[in-house]
Amino acid sequence: MTHPLSQEHRALIERLLGEMTLGEKIGQMTQAEKNSVRRGDVARLGLGSVLSGGGGSPKPNTPEAWRAMVGEFIRESLASPVGIPLLYGVDAVHGHNNVLGATIFPHNIGLGATRDPALVRRIGRATALEVAATNVRWDFAPAVSIPQDLRWGRTYEGYSQDPALVTELATAYVEGLRGDRWDSPTSVLPSVKHYVADGATAFGTSKRVNELGMMFDQTLALARTGESLTKLRRLGAWQIDQGDSPIDEATLRAIHLPPYGAAIEAGALNVMASYSSWRGLRMHAHRYLLSGVLKGELGFQGFVVSDWEAIDQIHPGDYPRCVADAVNAGVDMVMVPFDPERFIRTLRAEVEAGRVSGARIDDAVRRILTAKAALGLFERPYTDEALLSLVGCPEHRALAREAVRKSLVLLKNEGNVLPLSPDLPALLVAGEAADDLGAQCGGWTITWMGGHGAVTPGTTILEGLRRQFGHPARVHFVPDGDTNSRYPVGLAVLAEEPYAEGMGDRRELRLTPKHLALLARVRRQCDRLVVVLLSGRPLVVTEQVPGWDAFVAAWLPGTEGDGVAEVLCGAAPFTGRLGFAWPLSQADLARTPTSRTLWQIGAGLTPASREPTPLSPTP
């Protein structure tokens, strides 16, 4: 797609390129994390971008404080000698999820189950409005990953394993971030990621820990979980994320490339490179795929940004070579994030030594300025403060609740135990996750790894059930399921621990001993057992499902637990269908020609489909 920049903008960009010093150009290519930027650094270094990493929030964490913080960075950029407005970036991957009180939508795996591009487009628009309210105009989303191995900790960031569905929904999200046009005051730049084939990495190929040791973000996560790195590695953490994709080029082009072409056609002007490698070569150094395929064949006119400190992995211990290889391959802006001056100093030296050409620098900066001009930042570097009223507003929460309702997948329903009868004298609800907002939201919620409890304002599934029944006393919540009472129906809510990226890589995907003990207690005390699973991917439940009367895959629904309760109680129908194949056994977690499924992509019971889904394995 040829982006409709005005002749005035094109002339402005060329004039700036002619006037800028090498240092100012490299500054535009630099993106630093906000905690590494001291007052005055943006103006002094001419930084092109600042970002908030997962949990990179101001104190206090309020929409108003966010707006003021980002506004100050913008003000500094305008006061720099070159005066180019700064572009601030955030990981708003399921709503403006770093901001306390923002609307948290279902993660992409749930949105994929809705199969509703119009809904995803509206979610993109609502997210853009809440992001723009804080002066932020760049969202590191959508992920267009097509996960092939469910053990990957980023599986929930993918809409589906069906490339056509991923392409349709990702394009809708891009259109939602855009709104009426790219230069409108509430448009937000999408970052289509992670280019390319990040979902095809093979288990055991991640070298992140071996190459770089304990990273800053891992240290934070370990402090929160209390787990040792050794134990996490034994469970499978950092075994597949950022690993190597061994697929052939035909597979890469047929399965993993199409969403990028569609997003570019929709006007996307940023792509984030993947940490992963393709057949042994780091994507951040892959000139053929970045410059040849993306910028050449697909005609991408925007800019490529690196991922968090990702260029360091190209040649560990040889930073100048990392910088030169990444920029020469086609990376235009580098997410440093801790030491922007080191990057600026190094790239200048590489240019002066002739290892990076001036033409490559000009090309990178031209692409960055093109995106800024397309967003209208030169005319309106700040957004309207009145947008703050939209952060977490009732309309956006109603939209999120609609998304939750449409994302639930009913996989078993013996005797039509669901929807729950309004005449039930009492309902047993078990499982701590039933009243755990953090478990509903998963990773990338307020912090990078997410957490448990009331991490942000919202409604839990338990609260929603009590509201649906009208008489809260009829809903008996026993978190551990240990009760001597007898119930006609017991509802057990199970959840994966919140996680993000490689911290969620696992060797096996199964219910925990704690889950199984809970289910055994509830089963003894109820006539009918309904299981609701909160998870970022399918877990192997083949042995357990025969003992359940109903099974609902609820994914990671976000802050609006009311939506789960509404469908369980019949206020809305089950309409969701699997976007991922549900594995029969641990041997079937990675998609291969011999993989067997318990339920295939597209499975899901609806009001018109009363027979339980067969449990026989399918090829």
Image: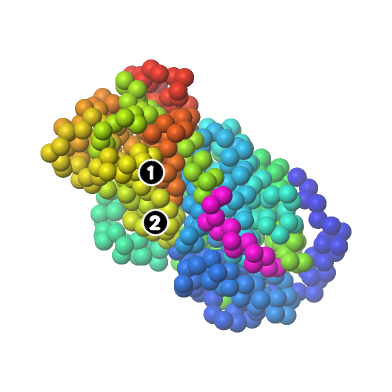
Quadrant hosting residue 571: top left
In the image, residue 477 lies at what x, y percent?
25, 45
Q: Quadrant of the N terminus?
A: top right
What residue appears at the point 73 percent right and 80 percent down from the top-left corner? 81
Disc 2 residue crowd, few under 14, some 14–19, many 20+, Cα 10 Å: many
Looking at this view, is 462 or 453 the one in front? 462
Quadrant hosting residue 431: top left
Amino acid type of the residue that numbered disc 1 sits on in the rendered structure: Arg
Mark 1 or mark 2, which is nearer the start of the sequence?
2
Pair 2/1: label in front: 1
Spatial CA distance of label 2 from label 1 is: 26 Å
| Image position of 68 (left or right of 21) | left
Q: Which residue is mark 1?
A: 467
What residue appears at the point 71 percent right and 42 percent down from the top-left corner? 265
Q: Which region is colored magenta?
A: 381-396
Give the secondary structure at mark 2: loop
Q: Which residue is mark 2?
A: 450
| Residue 391 inside the magenta-drawn segment | yes
